[in-house]
């Protein structure tokens, strides 16, 4: 018998060792998941704040550009007529944004007014490429950049007087409001500028540095800055997911420049003791319950074996074991108390009146236990949740069927949270159904991510729907034609000076330049000979048809495609169609697509002609410079001819 008992004890010990090793590994995995999730949450929150700040800065700049006194002051060349300082003072007194700087530049590139200094009149277009480009294109700009004052948000809008370009309004704002928002959420930010960009800072706005790196936020913690310096600033700038540093979770979001190289590193410190460890604690509780259950089971088996031959001894041992069970009861009670604090749990009677609410339930809802007991769950029902969902839930529960559902709940303070709720029946000792219980998991963060994904999917659906119309085209032009036009358009856009994002947008939109041809009859569309005047008039309607098809959407891609479809047959000298506009009045998208389309069309066989030779095409392009085509684009074409020919060879019909 002793051998059997010893064997059972050995097995129990081995099992506990294995379980402990497994438990240690799982705890480590759970912690890693919590740290990664929090790191992603911090980065997404910062991205949201940056996007909001850019949007607000752009909105304020736009309003200033539309102020009549700005245009009037520029026309009169009298900065005293401006009201910018009063407007800025008002915004700073009622809003969260401080240290807003405004600069007004005249149409020739000279500084007309600066809100932060009395100095003006210098020719800044000479060393500010962005201002020089805007004077040429009159296109608004909204960027994050680095200058002599540090890293800032810069937004520029053109100023017009009666449709005439007369100057530029530039708004410069800093990262301090974002840093304050992060601090209010228990996130300590240290905004570190790349060493190469720090060299450009001549008059640092914050006056803060860590070694050779400029710090862009005024509220940067001196203590954390010192720790970063001592530990090595490069280690913080190279964090990909997260790093545990002392009692902080640290994550870094790089801010890229226009070449996608890191310009700034947004380092965020979050106290480890503030992390939500609900899932980790729940796992610990579940594991302890399993271990205790297995232990009790093995002990029970030992008791049963010993019962046959050691009845008298068993009686004594039962007393001893009873004492052990009492201790376990106390332990279980403490576990139940811990469960109550960590798990969102409630019970109701058969009518749905709350009879018990855990501490975790009270904490997430904002209600006290006294406010919940005796109330229906409608006290936390959010208006967004349809009544039909709860009606169906009750119908299933009344059939004594367990139910799992995602539920959006309302907090006492008016906020909300999402839970994955599992509803079950409650029975008394005799098996009588006496009520219901629900265990919930907080999935608020997950639902926010899903909402963002839904928005992205809706955008994609709209694009796919619009692109589906292209499939109805009956033109006999090859698919490779639109591929080549797309590639040519991007090459021209980049060399013209458009940024990578806008050039890529034009590349995606340019294949839809002839989308309107889907509405042109086959007899005209694929006619092998020349068109009659009546046929040419019908054929020319494809630009307006394409514009009307695409302009119904507010999506940037389809708006770009609508411009391309409508203007790619306009000519530099004003002899094109449909509106006979000329020069830079033709949108740059239309001018670029026109050249790309004609180059590919002339070099390809069509039902009405054979492909032209390169010499003939190049001769025509030189003749049509400043007639059909934008002269600058023609120069770009010949300066980079090898790139165009490489694309043509890659996407041969």
Image (cartoon, rainbow, N blue to C red):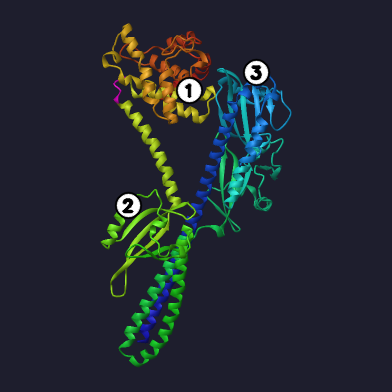
Are the two marked residues, 2 and 3, in contact with CB atoms closer than 8 angstroms?
Answer: no
Are the two marked residues, 3 and 1, in contact with CB atoms closer than 8 angstroms?
Answer: no
Q: Which residue bears the numbered disc 2?
A: 389
Asked which quadrant contains residue 472, the reply is top left
User: Which numbered dot is residue 396?
Assistant: none
Q: Residue 400: x, y in percent?
A: 27, 63
Q: Residue 520: x, y in percent?
A: 30, 17
| For discs 1 and 2, the disc positioned in front in the rendered view | 2
Task: Answer with left or right where residue 203 lies relative to residue 255.
Answer: right
Q: Secondary structure at mark 2?
A: helix
Q: Which residue bears the numbered disc 1?
A: 643
User: Which numbered dot is residue 75?
Assistant: 3
Task: Answer with left or right where residue 202 lies relative to residue 587.
Answer: right
Q: Which residues are magenta?
A: 472-476
Relative to residue 513, is residue 380 depicted above or below? below
Residue at image position (47%, 68%) is 338
Relative to residue 378, is residue 10 depicted above or below? below
Q: Is residue 258 visible in the rendered structure shown here?
A: no
Q: Is residue 473 magenta?
A: yes
Q: In the rendered structure, which disc, 2 or 3, sits on the residue that comes first in sequence?
A: 3
């Amino acid at each position: 018998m002793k051998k059997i008992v010893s064997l059972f004890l050995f097995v129990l010990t081995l099992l506990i060792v294995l379980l402990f090793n497994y438990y240690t590994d799982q705890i480590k995995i759970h912690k890693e998941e919590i740290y990664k999730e929090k790191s992603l949450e911090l980065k997404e929150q910062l991205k949201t704040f940056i996007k909001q700040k850019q949007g607000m800065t752009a909105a304020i700049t736009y309003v200033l550009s539309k102020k009549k006194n700005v245009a009037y002051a520029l026309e009169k060349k009298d900065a005293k007529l401006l009201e910018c300082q009063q407007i800025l003072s008002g915004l700073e007194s009622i809003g969260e944004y401080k240290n807003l700087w405004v600069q007004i530049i005249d149409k020739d590139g000279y500084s007309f007014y600066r809100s932060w200094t009395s100095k003006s009149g210098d020719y800044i277009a000479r060393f500010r490429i962005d201002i020089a480009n805007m004077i040429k294109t009159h296109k608004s700009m909204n960027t994050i950049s680095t200058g002599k004052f540090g890293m800032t948000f810069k937004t520029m809008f053109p100023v017009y007087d009666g449709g005439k370009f007369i100057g530029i309004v530039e708004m410069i704002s800093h990262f301090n409001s974002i840093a304050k928002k992060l601090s209010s959420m228990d996130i300590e930010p240290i905004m570190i500028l790349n060493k190469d960009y720090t060299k450009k800072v001549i008059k640092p706005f914050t006056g803060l540095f860590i070694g050779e790196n400029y710090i862009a936020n005024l509220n940067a913690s001196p203590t954390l800055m010192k720790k970063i310096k001592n530990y090595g600033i490069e280690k913080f700038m190279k964090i990909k997911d997260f790093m545990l540093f002392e009692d902080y979770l640290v994550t870094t979001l790089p801010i890229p420049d226009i070449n996608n190289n890191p310009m700034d590193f947004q380092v965020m410190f979050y106290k480890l003791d503030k992390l939500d460890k609900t899932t980790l604690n729940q796992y610990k509780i579940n594991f302890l319950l399993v271990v205790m259950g297995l232990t009790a089971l093995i002990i029970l088996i030992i008791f049963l074996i010993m019962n046959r031959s050691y009845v008298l001894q068993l009686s004594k041992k039962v007393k001893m074991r009873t004492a052990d069970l009492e201790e376990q009861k106390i332990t279980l009670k403490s576990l139940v108390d811990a469960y109550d604090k960590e798990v969102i749990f409630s019970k109701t009677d058969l009518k749905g009146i709350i009879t018990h609410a855990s501490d975790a339930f009270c904490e997430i809802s904002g209600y006290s236990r006294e406010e919940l007991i005796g109330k229906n769950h409608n006290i936390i029902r959010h208006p967004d949740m349809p009544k039909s969902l709860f009606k169906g839930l009750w119908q299933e529960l009344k059939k004594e069927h367990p139910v799992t559902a995602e539920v959006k709940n309302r907090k006492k303070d008016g906020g909300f949270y999402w839970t994955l709720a599992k509803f079950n029946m409650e029975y008394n000792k005799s098996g009588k159904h006496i009520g219901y219980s629900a265990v919930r998991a907080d999935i608020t963060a997950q639902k926010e991510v899903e909402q963002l994904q839904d928005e992205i999917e809706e955008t994609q659906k709209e694009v796919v729907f619009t692109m589906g119309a292209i499939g109805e085209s009956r033109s006999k032009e090859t698919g490779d034609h639109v591929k080549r036009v797309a590639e040519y358009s991007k090459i021209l856009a980049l060399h013209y000076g458009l940024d990578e994002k806008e050039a890529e947008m034009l590349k995606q939109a340019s294949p839809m330049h002839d989308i309107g041809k889907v509405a042109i009859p086959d007899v005209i569309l694929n006619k092998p000979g020349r068109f009659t005047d009546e046929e040419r008039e019908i054929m020319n309607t494809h630009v307006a048809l394409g514009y009307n098809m695409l302009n119904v959407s507010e999506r940037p891609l389809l708006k770009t495609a609508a411009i391309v479809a409508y203007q790619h047959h306009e000519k530099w000298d004003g002899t094109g169609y449909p509106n006979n506009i000329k020069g830079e009045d033709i949108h740059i998208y239309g001018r670029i697509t026109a050249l790309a389309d004609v180059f590919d069309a002339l070099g390809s066989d069509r039902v009405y002609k054979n492909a032209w030779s390169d010499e003939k095409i190049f001769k025509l392009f030189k003749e049509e410079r400043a007639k059909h085509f934008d002269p600058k684009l023609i120069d770009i074409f010949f300066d980079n001819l090898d790139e165009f020919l490489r694309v043509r060879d890659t996407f041969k019909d």
